[in-house]
Image (cartoon, rainbow, N blue to C red):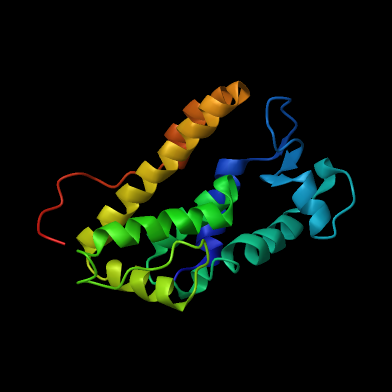
């Protein structure tokens, strides 16, 4: 099963330390945790003083556990959904996963379609664990997740000009693209 600690290390590298970029709709952040989210989890001090352990608790409870990522067998897919949840929202991340699963299942032959509700319930977990049972299925799923996430970034950059400031970083640092050249059939 996927390991939270391994995934968290990647998130903390990508998110960095304190930031208060006026173009960021999230406002003041530390370790990628917005002030609004920190307040919702009971932190009321200055954002610069937010401790890593508090950020870790928020990431575990509000992102990783909310998406039931402990139940995902593929570390790569769990990390991708986790990172996407941090950057795009957990519901969006799970919807991207559900959408990808539904088009990779050969019209329900490999696993049943799942409801695109943004909830990582038992049927979505079953489908993702079947889908990632073979290496090339995992690769295809990761590629589709990157495609869907990339489309999301383009959409929000087109809606809000200030988001263009972050587009290059999102594309280069947030989109995991699997290696090309995987043989075989899904």
Q: Is residue 39 left or right of residue 102?
A: right
In the image, is residue 135 above or below residue 50?
A: below
Q: Residue 47 versus residue 92: which sits nearer the camera?
A: 92
Determine the image quadrant of residue 106.
bottom left
Q: Is residue 157 left or right of residue 185?
A: right
Task: Looking at this view, name the residue that lies furthest to the right.
Answer: 45
Q: Position of residue 67 (x, y in %)?
A: 54, 66
> In which quadrant is the N terminus drawn?
bottom left
Q: Position of residue 45 (x, y in %)?
A: 90, 49
Determine the image quadrant of residue 112.
bottom left
Report the label total: 0
Q: Position of residue 185 (x, y in %)?
A: 11, 60
Point 44% across, 33% down: residue: 171
Q: Is residue 145 left or right of residue 45?
A: left
Point 52% across, 52% down: residue: 92
Q: Residue 64 versus residue 116: which sits nearer the camera?
A: 116
Q: Position of residue 49 (x, y in %)?
A: 84, 46
Report if residue 176 is visible in the image: no
Q: Residue 59 versus residue 50: which sits nearer the camera?
A: 59
Report if residue 98 is visible in the image: yes
Point 70% across, 38% down: residue: 26
In the image, is residue 69 above or below residue 144?
A: below
> In which quadrant is the C terminus drawn?
bottom left
In the image, is residue 86 above or below residue 137?
A: above
Point 50% across, 63% down: residue: 117
């Amino acid at each position: 099963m996927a390991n939270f600690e391994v995934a968290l290390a990647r998130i903390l590298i990508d998110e960095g330390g304190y930031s208060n970029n006026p173009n960021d709709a999230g406002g003041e952040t530390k370790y990628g945790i917005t002030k609004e989210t920190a307040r919702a989890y009971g932190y009321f001090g200055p954002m610069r003083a937010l401790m890593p352990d508090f950020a870790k608790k928020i990431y575990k409870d509000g992102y990783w556990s909310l998406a039931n990522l402990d139940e995902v067998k593929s570390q790569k897919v769990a990390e991708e959904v986790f990172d996407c949840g941090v950057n795009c929202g957990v519901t969006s991340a799970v919807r991207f996963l559900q959408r990808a699963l539904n088009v990779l299942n050969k019209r329900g032959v490999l696993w049943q379609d799942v409801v695109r509700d943004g909830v990582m319930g038992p049927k979505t977990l079953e489908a993702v664990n079947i889908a990632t049972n073979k290496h090339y299925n995992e690769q295809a799923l990761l590629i589709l997740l990157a495609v869907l996430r990339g489309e999301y970034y383009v959409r929000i950059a087109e809606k809000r000009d200030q988001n263009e400031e972050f587009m290059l970083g999102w594309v280069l640092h947030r989109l995991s693209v699997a290696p090309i050249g995987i043989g075989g059939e899904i």
